[in-house]
Image (spheres, rainbow, N blue to C red):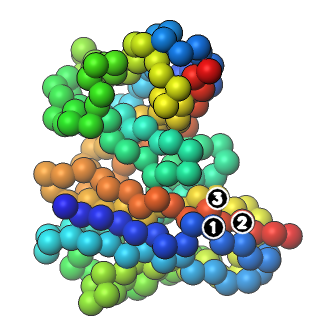
């Protein structure tokens, strides 16, 4: 069965610092999807990105970037020049056909002014 | 496009009482999910519906939890009788194609005292 590990329980940074959130997954599948979700204090899980297992290109979206490395089963998320509004819990998740999303335990990011 | 609607937003009940949560998914999304998120943990799937049929309820505590999606649109999750350990946020999500990602509602925060 697939498993998602987010080793960092909590991270605190000062505004404008860069921060990387780690995600390591376990799967026997060759085709799968990885996701990052943000959960702000309001509670709603907000979709950030999806990556399929055949696309190892890194992606950048504004201050957000993602590094997918199949060789190390990692899908890390970097926020550049962090802002207070980035404070939230971030979840990494794995999905494969015929199964359900498996979420990691989440990393709580606090960005201090 | 309207998001996933959930109500109530908050609920406090005494143990052994019953409670019901309501979810209205995004229009056209055939698949609906109920997740339980205990404080400090990632969401855990309780039940998945495809239209009005149950696809996966393997992690639903059926002695006290029940869910229905009678007309294949909105859904109700019920707990009867509630226990202290049921205190959590109950998230509803829907999807058109799961590999595209789920859209989550804001959740219902349940406190059992």
Sooner in the amino-acid sequence: mark 1 or mark 2: 1
Sooner in the amino-acid sequence: mark 3 or mark 1: 1
In the picture as drawn, the residue positioned furthest to the right comes out as A113
Which residue is drawn at the image coordinates 31% and 87% (left, top)? A72
For disc 2, the marked residue is A110
Query: SS at mark 1?
Result: strand
A94 relative to B82 in the view: left or right: left
**In the image, is residue A76 above or below residue A85?**
below
Q: Do the residues labelled 1 and 2 touch (CB within 8 Å)?
A: yes
For disc 3, the marked residue is A88
- What separation in Å lies between label 2 and label 3 (alpha carbons)? 7 Å
Sooner in the amino-acid sequence: mark 2 or mark 3: 3
Q: Where residue B92 appears, x then y in whole percent?
A: 42, 35
Q: Disc number at residue A10?
A: 1
Q: Where residue A73 appears, x then y in whole percent?
A: 30, 81
Q: Say which of A14 and B4 sits in front.
A: A14
Q: Say which of A45 and B16 sits in front.
A: B16
Chain identity of mark 2? A
- What separation in Å lies between label 1 and label 2 (alpha carbons)? 8 Å
Which residue is drawn at the image coordinates 34% and 18% (left, top)? B64
Q: Quadrant of the N terminus of chain A?
A: bottom left
Chain identity of mark 1? A
């Amino acid at each position: 069965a697939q498993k998602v590990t987010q080793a960092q329980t909590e991270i605190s940074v000062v505004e404008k610092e860069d921060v990387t959130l780690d995600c390591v997954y376990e799967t026997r599948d060759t085709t799968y999807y990885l996701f990052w979700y943000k959960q702000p204090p309001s509670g709603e899980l907000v979709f950030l990105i999806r990556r399929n297992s055949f696309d190892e290109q890194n992606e950048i979206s504004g201050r957000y970037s993602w590094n997918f490395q199949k060789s190390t089963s990692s899908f890390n998320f970097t926020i550049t020049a962090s802002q207070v509004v980035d404070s939230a819990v971030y979840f990494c998740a794995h999905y494969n056909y015929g199964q359900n999303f498996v979420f990691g335990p989440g990393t709580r990011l606090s960005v201090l002014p | 496009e309207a998001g996933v609607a959930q109500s109530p937003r908050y609920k406090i009940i005494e143990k052994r009482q019953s409670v019901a949560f309501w979810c209205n998914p995004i229009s056209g999304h055939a698949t609906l999910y109920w997740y339980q998120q205990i404080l400090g943990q990632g969401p855990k799937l309780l039940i998945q519906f495809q239209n009005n049929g149950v696809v996966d309820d393997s992690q639903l505590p059926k002695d006290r939890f029940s869910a229905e999606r009678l007309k294949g649109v909105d859904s109700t999750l019920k707990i009867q009788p509630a226990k202290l350990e049921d205190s959590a946020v109950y998230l509803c999500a829907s999807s058109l194609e799961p590999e595209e990602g789920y859209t989550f509602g804001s959740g219902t925060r349940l406190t059992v005292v």
